[in-house]
Image (cartoon, rainbow, N blue to C red):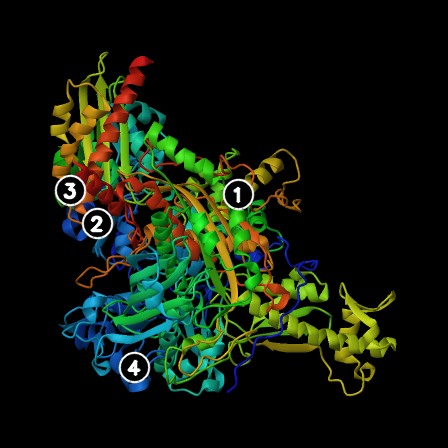
Amino acid sequence: MTATQEPTAVTHGGTKPAYKYIGSDRKRVEDPRLLVGRGGYVADMKMQGLLHAAILRSPLPHARIASIDTSGAEAIPGVIAVLTGEDCKAHMNPCMNFGPSTISQYPIAVDKVRYVGECVAVVVAESRYVAEDGIEALEVEFDELPAVTNPHAALEPDAALLHDEHGSNLGYERTFEFGDITKALDDAHLVVSDTLHWGRSAGMPMETSGAIARPGTNGVLEVYCNSLNFSYLQFLVAGALRIPSNKLKMQPVAAGGSFGSKFTAHKVPTLAAFLALRTGRPVSYVEDRLDHLMNSDHHASDRYYEARMGFTEDGMITGLDVDVVDDYGAYLQFGVGTHGNALSQATGPYRFRDLRYKLRAALTNKCQQGAYRGFGSEVHNWVLERLVEQGAKKLGLAPEEIRRRNFIQPEEFPYKIPGGNVYDSGNYPEVLDRALSMIDVEHWRREKKRLREEEGRYIGLGIATTQERSVFSSTEFWFWFDEPAFPITSSPESATITIDPAGQFQLLLHCQAMWGNSPETVSTTVLAEEFGVEPESVNVSYADTSRALPGTGPGGSRYTVMVAGAVRGASRKLKKKLIDIAAHSLEVSADDLELVDGRVQVVGAPERSLGIPDLAASAYFFALNLPPGMESGLEEAYTYDHPYTTLPSADRSDLGVFYPIMGHACHIAVMEVDPDTGRCSFLDYVAVHDAGTVVNPKSLGGHVTGGSAQGLGTSLYEELAYDTEGQFNSATFLDYLVPSANEVPPFRIGHVETPSPYTEYGIKGGGEGGRMVTPSVVSAAVDDALAEYGMHVQELPVRPATIVETVQDAIDARQ
Amino acid sequence: MTTAENPATATDTRTITLLVNGREVTRAVSTRTTLSDFLREDLDLVSVHLGCEHGVCGCCTVLFDGESVRACLMLAVQARGHEVETVESLSADQNDLHPIQQSFAEEQGLQCGFCTPAMVLRAKEILADGRERSDAEVRSDISGILCRCTGYQNIVNAVQNAGRKLSRGANGGAGTHDGVGTSAVDGAETEQATDIDRAPGFDGPAGTEQRG
Amino acid sequence: MKPPRFLYCDPDTLEEAVALKSQHEFDALVLAGGQSLMPMLNMRLAGPEVLIDINGVTDLQHIGRINGTLEIGAGVRQSVLEAHSEAAVAVPLIAAAMPHIGHIENRHRGTVGGSIAHADAAAELPCTAVTLDAVIVVRSERGERQIAATDFFQGFLTNACEPDELVVAIRYPVTSPTAGSAFTEFARREGDFALASAGAVAEVDADGRFTSVAIGVGSITTKPVRARAIEEALLGRAATSDVIKDAARQIGDAVTLSSDMHATSRYRRHLATTVVTRAVAAAAADAQNRSAS
């Protein structure tokens, strides 16, 4: 295998070309159908003879399943089947899994339950109502086992084992060191350290995961689902089901939000497929909210850090030492990819060279973890910014000043960070300056003092700057392992453009369907830019896996960049064909023709032209008008591979380039904290992001705002909480606190555009950014508001109780 | 599916007549069928989305005798003799949207669309009085419906935009259902770097504990 | 999350409803606004054999003054009470508390009697009932009883009704026009159940001293309680913030709820003090405004 070398930079010439469609606040093409309530979600599908499944969720965190009496359920009229782990053991293979093979998982627990909420049995019935009646009639005997809930205790030798085959509760361990961290910290003028805990939350879309599976013709099993990156992973689902991959057709269905929660979410479609295979009937399994909260495909990061950072006397960062224990829950389906994300921007926007990153993945009796907006990089951002904040305080530097001193400078790009990833481009001082221009921090610093003295109010200011990596390469799935089972290097995206015989455009995308992002708006905007037709006139559809070209789907802020590349590539091929047909018809050289506003015309003589419908008619109906040897029809496909990725070195001293399209953001928040209730509110909030060339400012602003709101939830409200016994305390939306409009402030958004030299149009991904910054800025602002009480946020979410107790402790200590 | 033939649910079935989106409908329903399931399954009004089925997320919001309610917290049989409106009552035609729906499109007050019908219905309800609303008022008004995508700002903008559109329509201006072409706020900027002392939309801390 | 099977009854009259409750007793649950019961049915935390839907009982829909009290029928929607100007004048504490109950979508459907009967220690209406010495009117085929609010709420989601009894009305004593009222609560999100709440009604004399004060506190124990010791400590004292804060401190001792994911017990003690302090201060300020005007 050879590594891809640094690609030739696409020249953007310093100034952005004038685009007709790209860069304007156009309305989204997805919206009209959504506004009339016809989003086409999986639960909206009707099907003849459709059965419905409900699951029995484990009431215990850790137990052997001694027996399951299904007779009561089976006796209920309308119950069709009851399935248990025994059926899985007999008729399927373990689910897809990026972790060690000694940690296997089925969609129904086999032999043991390992967390509260894990699926113990499934009832398939004529309605969901009856299926739930069946669940109530099941009788299960468990032999309870000790619950392992503390990730540090889980790693002790005497801890109960979750997976006997694995031999320990250590799912994974590795230390990466780049540079000489010992020396960097020894030589530092100041070393700050912190113990931090990032609590467990999740993407928690308003629509849960769901799938309908139907035995179709030719022995093909059709699965309609709102999850999974199936054209990438469909064969793994087929493998779990023990059917040939060409007998499993997965059709993407629009999702009511994902934010990572549906990214490679395999349990739901695999379960629906298994039920359809066992019953021979179409079966729907749509999680209800309790299923989703307790037994979703994955919760998100739950990490405990010991971290240190060194500084020179004038505030230059010398190095970062991170020791993280990640509470992975009961399974390790994702491997440790969320930490690969952290390593892609481990040094943030700063210039230091020495880094150590030690990871231990602990297995505990909790739901497994996986993706959530930021994919683990947002956690590392928070740790990094917490340490920078502390350094600034101890060195007497303003938060903006310490960052400015450490920024990688615009002329230093492309910039290779310790660990090997490359940052493509950026202008961090400009982003900071832009944010500072939108809010008068000196005014607020005066106000903070005045309001404290005159009104007894507590105001705090937070500033954070953060990287927003985008466009992942699949090498991050395996560089963790010295002998990876499947060292994949592809992460492509495809598009097929068809001009039909009447000259109308069809655009086929080969990814998961719309998840709340704007794949159709982005792809039709690019198509419009290339052909000069109105985006709204293009019909977009999504390939099922029987037709799909290579695709990876949304995730890691990649889709806008990747689909733009795919659509532009397909456009180039199709435009060439149109021009060749026109050249033949007009009897001119193809070099003398150009495509302008939907017509092919002679350069300098636009009156000599042919419209796309004329050319389409030729392509479909008048073969004798085509150039000799040309195929009839007007359809071109293009698969756009990752624009810039390289292999890791064999010894992993260099992880290669795997996340090079690097955005950046600066958020500034002014918060008020009530020390007697712990209430946190916002007086102002600005968020400036650089996601390269902006395709649609309003859409990008919407993603920044939405991501920031989620970051706010992670910071102050949301918690998937297990108690020390392993019971789950967040089983309803009364306890898992998704912020409402009352909790979310009016974020003021700014954009800076530093195009990527490596992507089409210079676009960078920007879908995850908000959430990658908000926790840092909220933590800093809360600390600042209550600095006189020694407030120091070490755990998210920051609970009101923590705030009030910190203040009370300080008051008690003074007395 | 809650058909009368279903042996498990046929034990207690009622025939109900109600007004749905202006039309009288009569159906036999199992008495344990929720209103949300009845609208979705029996009447195919799949705009009523099930987000939590315990009355918190608000995605199943419908107007019941003109007032917003959680359809998951009602039984279908309780709607007998009442009027129910879903988002289809504004417009079910993607090519001829109601001004409120148009405003949501113009302001991108939606992303995944799952809370959207509820938000649009709630907007209709609150805008009925024709009063202009501040950012903070709209936030409070829509706080019973959770949106996970937008961070709410574009929804707030959409509701305010719709209010202006509807009041122009009421005054015989351009804002009629059929006549509205372009957004009233096409020129609005996503960032406002000028008014630094008092940020737009920040009405000061509206304390949960400060009311009353 | 779908409701289990039950026998559904929807009486048109109070007599029919009472007869059904007498007939089925423990086997029956009463469906009022459904904002608490329906989630429990959907989650199958409740599984009644019989569901008595009282939404069609028009006898329960009245609001009016009777013998110095404001009587509110059990079936009155919370949003109707919230918008009822006469009720707001008669018992200002109700108007202050209503917006805190869930969200408007809940109040459009939720009923006054449903909230009272559900007897949630964190709910607003039970707290107002205790604060104001309201009387709960319950009826069975054996007759009608009036139960003082402080006796009605007995513990975690437990009320004093016999299994054949139905809550039919709540009677609030009409508040003196010179009294000030305030309701204060703190929830993690607006609309959530309060982590601590307090209702206060107070009168102050020309010297700014408390001549009467009533304080009810929610969400600190398994039922809403009166803070009588604080009331006594405040009577005759000047309504200054220091006095109020000092007196309010002892509410911390009444907190019995143990720590949960939203509130440690230590935090809840401090929060209870805070909401009581703020409610009493606001009620006193309201009283002074009323005297001035």
The outermost residue toward the top is C206
Q: Nearer the viewer, mark 4 or mark 3?
A: 3
Q: Amino acid at mark 1?
A: Met
Q: Label 3 marks which chain's residue? A: C
**Are dots 4 and 3 on a single chain?**
no
Local packing at callout 1 (Cα closer than 10 Å; few below 14, some 14-19, many 20+) is many
Residue B200 image point, x, y percent: 51, 38
Local packing at callout 2 (Cα closer than 10 Å; few below 14, some 14-19, many 20+) is some
**What's the CA distance linking mark 1 and mark 2?**
57 Å
**What's the CA distance linking mark 4 and mark 3?**
47 Å
The residue drawn where x is 26% and y is 58% is: A721
Q: Which residue is mark 4?
A: A88
Q: Which residue is mark 3?
A: C221
**Are dots 1 and 4 on a single chain?**
yes
- Mark linked to residue A302: none
Q: Label 1 marks which chain's residue? A: A
In what quadrant of the picture does the C terminus of chain A appear? top left
The residue drawn where x is 44% and y is 68% is: A344
Q: Amino acid at mark 4?
A: Cys
**What's the CA distance linking mark 2 and mark 3?**
25 Å
Question: Judging from the image, what secondary structure is the residue with disc 2 in?
Answer: strand
Whether tag 2 and tag 4 are in contact, CB under 8 A, the answer is no
Q: Which residue is mark 2?
A: C29
Query: Closest to the observer: C139 or A752?
Result: A752
Question: Judging from the image, what secondary structure is the residue with disc 4 in?
Answer: helix
Q: Nearer the viewer, mark 2 or mark 4?
A: 4
Q: Which residue is mark 1?
A: A438
Query: Closest to the observer: B133 or B39?
Result: B133
Q: Label 4 marks which chain's residue? A: A
Question: Judging from the image, what secondary structure is the residue with disc 3 in?
Answer: loop
